[in-house]
Image: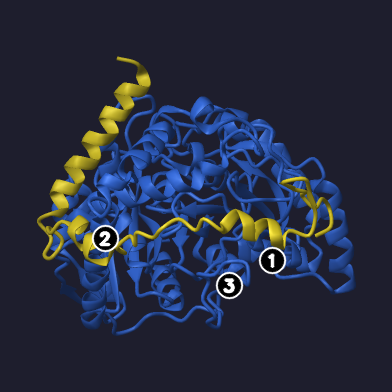
Chain colours: A yellow, B blue
């Protein structure tokens, strides 16, 4: 085992021992992971905007053939 | 050479009996003679010239409150043009590009920065042995560790190599070495002192504070460095009282807790500190009251998960691109343990399991103290659960962490805390720790001064 692996194992063990001890405090035993699920935003499935590239190209101030030309040092 | 206390020295400098230049030269000589203590990583080569400028100001009657005093600074506090190494190979060649808020204030009051002190690497240690520049030696008890992480600051004060030193305290890093070296040290309330320019260990707990031979020096320094700053969003906008204008405490309630007694491995230490508390109560017409601190035995287990995560986050800037070397490639074992541990428990799959759980218990401990301070004015405890270990002794990390069990609660609760000498056991200095509610530094200093006057 390398020194880094050993330290990783040791650090994990220390944290696990410490967290086990904290479970004895009132109101901290529950799994917060479930709390997070409740507040997670549901992903909305949307159809791809097929006109996106066209709109970008139309709005770009500088273009060459079918490429957008980056503006350098103008901002 | 007779070592003068800060108040006497200021009077001598003000009256012209001692010049700032002479004061600095005396210290530079002592630093040279005491090299083996290894308290300093860097000594200010321009200190004498700066002292001459202060002498001119003194003659003109324009000098500040710290005029001519030599101030040592922990190597994690930015001072322009001085090496801010954090006692690590990682920042070995990094020089401060700006003055921290506290340094600006000290310079405004004509204090002279005499040098940068040794410390545990990145303030992640409690013994003073983990510096890449070698361990600091305890000047009053050389076979024992000086304590950390502000080891050099405490040793410099104890060996008479400066007038006042600055340290930082995240879980006891000022109070622990102050106790081991037999001097005075203060951790201010969270938010009392701006941390702008401090290289952080854990943003939820870090505070900069003073170390000195006497309570007056600490009080004077704290009233100078305290106050709100636009550059530190957690610094509170509250008036700073005149801490060095002491008033003897009288008829107050002093709390002692059996919960702290249980954490104290060496019962002689608790016995000594309890006797001190009883003597203080008797001489100040005060009363002792037992208080319960239900969750204080979980302080260490609460503190370290928070510190691991915040330290990991804080060190991401040290990737070798902007400041020196990549930290993981150049740091010592304890720093690496905290980084790896923090990285592991920051992972998404552990969300809430470690950090947020620890934050919840932190709140419970804070409530414990809020309730206790409804019944008592101050709380007295020892600083360390046992005597400092022998220099070079190997301890496993969990045992080492437990050494902070009596100092960490003040950081978790955000209250202020100070250490004064209690006495000696086996010829080793033992400190007495006083807790006062957040932003009651005036009460804290009055209690510390009352004890100092009794104990001289």
Q: How would you rate the neighbour count of disc 1 (Cα within 10 Å): few for under 14, some for 14-19, many for 20 or more?
A: some
Residue A45: where, in percent of width, then height? 34, 59
Q: Secondary structure at mark 3?
A: helix
Q: What residue is rendered at 77% in x and 48% in y?
A: A69
Q: Are marks 3 and 1 in contact (CB under 8 Å)?
A: no
Name the mark on residue B105.
Answer: 1
Q: Residue at 69% of width from left, 56% of height from top?
A: A57
> In the rendered structure, the residue with mark 1 lies on which chain?
B
Q: Chain of mark 2?
A: B
Q: Which mark is residue B323?
A: none
Q: Residues within 10 Å of mark 2 (few under 14, many from 20)?
A: many
At 84% from the left and 57% from the top, the residue drawn is A74
Specify the quadrant that holds the C terminus of chain B.
bottom left
Instruction: Give the residue pinned by disc 2.
Output: B381
Name the residue tied to disc 3.
B223
Q: Is residue B32 left or right of residue A30?
A: right
State which tag comes first along the sequence, 3 or 1. 1
Q: Position of residue A7 (x, y in %)?
A: 32, 27
From the image, which quarter does the N terminus of chain B lie in? top right
Q: Mark 3 belongs to which subunit?
A: B
Q: Secondary structure at mark 1?
A: helix
Residue A28 or residue B300, whichever sits in front: A28
Give the answer, above or below, for where A16 lies relative to B330: below
- Number of dots carrying numbers: 3
Pointer 3 and pointer 2: residues touching (CB < 8 Å)? no
Q: Nearer the viewer, residue B326 or B333?
A: B326
Give whichever of discs 3 and 2 has the lower sequence position.
Answer: 3
Determine if residue B103 is in view: yes
- Residue B315's x, y, as percent? 51, 43
**Same subunit, tags 2 and 1:** yes
């Amino acid at each position: 085992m390398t020194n880094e692996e050993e330290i990783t194992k040791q650090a994990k063990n220390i944290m696990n021992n410490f967290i086990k001890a904290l479970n004895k405090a009132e109101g901290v035993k529950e799994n917060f992971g479930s709390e997070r699920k409740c507040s997670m935003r549901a992903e909305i499935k949307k159809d791809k905007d097929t006109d996106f590239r066209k709109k970008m190209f139309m709005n770009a101030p500088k273009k060459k053939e079918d490429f957008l030309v980056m503006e350098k040092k103008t901002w | 050479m007779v070592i003068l206390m800060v108040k006497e020295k200021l009077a001598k400098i003000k009256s012209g009996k001692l010049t700032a230049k002479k004061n600095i030269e005396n210290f530079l000589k002592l630093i040279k003679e005491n090299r083996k203590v290894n308290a300093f990583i860097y000594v200010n080569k321009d200190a004498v010239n700066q002292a001459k400028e202060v002498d001119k100001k003194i003659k003109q009657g324009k000098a500040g409150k710290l005029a001519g005093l030599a101030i040592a600074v922990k190597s994690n506090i930015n001072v322009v043009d001085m090496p801010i190494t954090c006692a690590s190979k990682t920042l070995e060649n990094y020089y401060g590009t700006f003055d921290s808020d506290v340094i600006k204030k000290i310079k405004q009051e004509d204090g002279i920065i005499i040098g940068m002190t040794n410390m545990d690497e990145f303030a992640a240690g409690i013994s003073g042995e983990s510096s890449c520049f070698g361990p600091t030696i305890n000047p009053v008890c050389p076979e024992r560790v000086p304590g950390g992480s502000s080891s050099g600051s405490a040793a410099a004060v104890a060996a008479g190599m400066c007038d006042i030193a600055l340290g930082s305290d995240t879980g006891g890093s000022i109070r622990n070495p102050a106790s081991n070296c037999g001097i005075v040290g203060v951790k201010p309330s969270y938010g009392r002192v701006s941390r702008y320019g401090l290289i952080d260990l854990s943003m939820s707990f870090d505070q900069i504070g003073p170390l000195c031979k006497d309570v007056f020096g600490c009080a004077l320094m704290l009233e100078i460095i305290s106050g709100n700053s636009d550059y530190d969003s957690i610094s509170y906008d509250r008036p700073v009282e005149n801490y060095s204008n002491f008033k003897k405490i009288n008829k107050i309630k002093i709390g002692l807790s059996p919960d702290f007694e249980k954490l104290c491995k060496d019962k002689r230490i608790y016995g000594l500190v309890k006797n001190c508390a009883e003597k203080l109560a008797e001489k100040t017409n005060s009363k002792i009251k037992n208080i319960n601190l239900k969750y204080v035995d979980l302080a260490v287990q609460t503190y370290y998960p928070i510190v691991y995560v915040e330290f990991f986050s804080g060190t991401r800037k040290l990737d070798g691109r902007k400041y020196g070397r990549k930290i993981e490639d150049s740091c010592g074992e304890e720093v690496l343990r905290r980084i790896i541990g923090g990285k592991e428990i920051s992972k998404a799959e552990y969300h809430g399991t470690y950090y947020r759980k620890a934050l919840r218990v932190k709140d419970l401990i804070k409530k414990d103290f809020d309730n206790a301070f409804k019944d008592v004015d101050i709380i007295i405890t020892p600083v360390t659960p046992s005597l400092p270990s022998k220099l070079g002794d190997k301890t496993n990390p969990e045992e080492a962490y437990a050494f902070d069990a009596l100092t960490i609660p003040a950081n978790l609760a955000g209250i202020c805390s100070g250490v004064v000498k209690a006495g000696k056991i086996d010829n080793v200095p033992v400190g007495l720790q006083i807790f006062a509610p957040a932003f009651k530094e005036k009460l804290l200093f009055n209690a510390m001064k009352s004890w100092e006057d009794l104990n001289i």
